[in-house]
Image (tube, grey):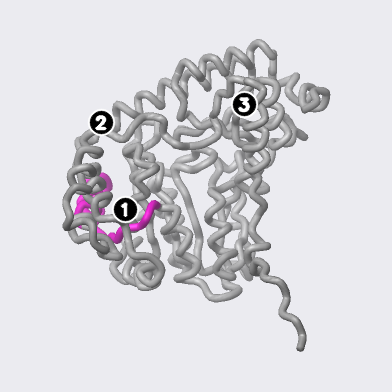
Amino acid sequence: MQKKPLISASERLSKLPPYLFAELDRQKKAAAKRGLDLIDFGIGDPDMPTPEEIVVAGQAALANPANHRYPDGAGSESYRNACREWMKSQFDVGCETAAVIGSKEGIAHIPMVFCNRGDLVLIPNPGYPVYRASAILADAIPVDLPLLGENGFLPDFEKIPPAVLREAKVMFLNYPNNPTGAVVSLEQMTEMVEFARVNNILLVSDNSYSHIRFDGVKPMSFLQVPGASDVVLEFHSLSKTFNMTGWRVGFVAGGVNLVKTFMGAKENIDSGIFTAIQKAGETAMAMDISGFEERLAVYRERREILVDGLNKLNWDIADSPGTFYVWVKLPRGADSMVFARKMINHAGIVITPGSGFGTWGEGYIRFALTIPSDRIHQAVGRLEQMELHKGRLLKWLKKTGD
């Protein structure tokens, strides 16, 4: 009798990109063991606490035994109504909503719901790694949408081959954009929705950073485009807007049929969000937006400190007003992972290499503004001491060992 092969991972798992940040984590731990004081711009996790009003609401809901039972998979009616009211108050949009365990979880299920084996999924590159991973795990095929600086980090739909458009079922878009910080106008959103409609493609908008922009423009939603609910599903997260990353709570919005289809699969996989957390989310979305404006002012101050400091060093910074990230271009020929590793070991500064967001992210690095202003000042000071001016960066990279 032939022996069964050893238990191993599936083929689809082997297709996932390598976890680039594992090496950075190793470098960080090694540097910390050497006693190096690390200034960490790496992760986009708000350092400011969840507003007290939200915490108190969550504590009260946690103490209520009625909330200790299985939640409604699609979200309680009161939570979904709070989401609908949020969409109306912030974007003047009427839509259906359903709860997701953070936008990451919701996004990851999209290709599983809407794609068959071999269908194509259009993926922004550079972009949030979950878009690509979700397609691979659903046996769909990810196809890059290059986001180039010369095009304002927007996709160029005219360069997509007709054969790709015929097979594409889903397109992920993310504005304000992680990692580039790019934003779009309502006119550009309208063009993107029309492109999706003409080509019968589901446009999945990751609007996690909707309210983090520094150009004074009111937050926008793809669902504001007339008729968009027929071809758009939009994900919102309370993580960045309300400093609730650890709570894992968000929602999906769109037309009734699309939301219902999405939840038809998701409800077979998980049992929804703990009701007490939903109650905290309801409180968050009912709060006066002025509280968020205070948090935005903190990010604005941090951004100005970092951008002004890097500009004085003649670094090439993307002029993008969205998200709490700063996207910086390295000199031609520089390897972003090598640069990130050397920044840890020689400056005690942690940044994210652009290659972690896809092939078109190579040659860039990302700073997250989720550390206090005084630490940003310190980081700029360290760079000034190292005299890493634009003309010397590549020379430094080639000469300095790890």
**What numbered label is drawn on residue 38?**
none
- For the residue pair 363 and 23, the one nearer the viewer reads as 23
Q: Which residue is mark 2?
A: 291
Q: Nearer the viewer, mark 2 or mark 1?
A: 2
Query: Looking at the image, which residue is at 45% across and 45% down?
Result: 175
- For the residue pair 188 and 131, the one nearer the viewer reads as 131
Q: Which part of the image, by quadrant, shows the C terminus?
A: top right
Q: Residues within 10 Å of mark 1 (few under 14, many from 20)?
A: some
Q: Nearer the viewer, mark 3 or mark 1?
A: 3
Q: Secondary structure at mark 3?
A: helix
**Stretch of the chain drawn in magenta:** 81-102
Q: Residues within 10 Å of mark 3 (few under 14, many from 20)?
A: some
| Side of 164 where 302 appears, left or right | left
| Side of 298 where 124 appears, left or right | right
Tell me, yes or no, if residue 118 can be seen here.
yes
Q: Amino acid at mark 2?
A: Gly
Q: Which residue is mark 1?
A: 224
Q: CA distance from mark 2 to mark 1?
A: 24 Å
- For the residue pair 187 and 333, the one nearer the viewer reads as 333
Q: CA distance from mark 3 to mark 2?
A: 36 Å
Query: Looking at the image, which residue is at 64% across and 26% down?
Result: 33
Residue 294 magenta-highlighted: no
In the depicted structure, whether residue 255 falls above or below residue 291: below
**What numbered label is drawn on residue 32?**
3
In the depicted structure, whether residue 262 falls above or below residue 44: below
- Where in the figure is residue 44, as x and y percent of width and height? 48, 37
First reached walking from the N terminus: tag 3 or tag 2:
3
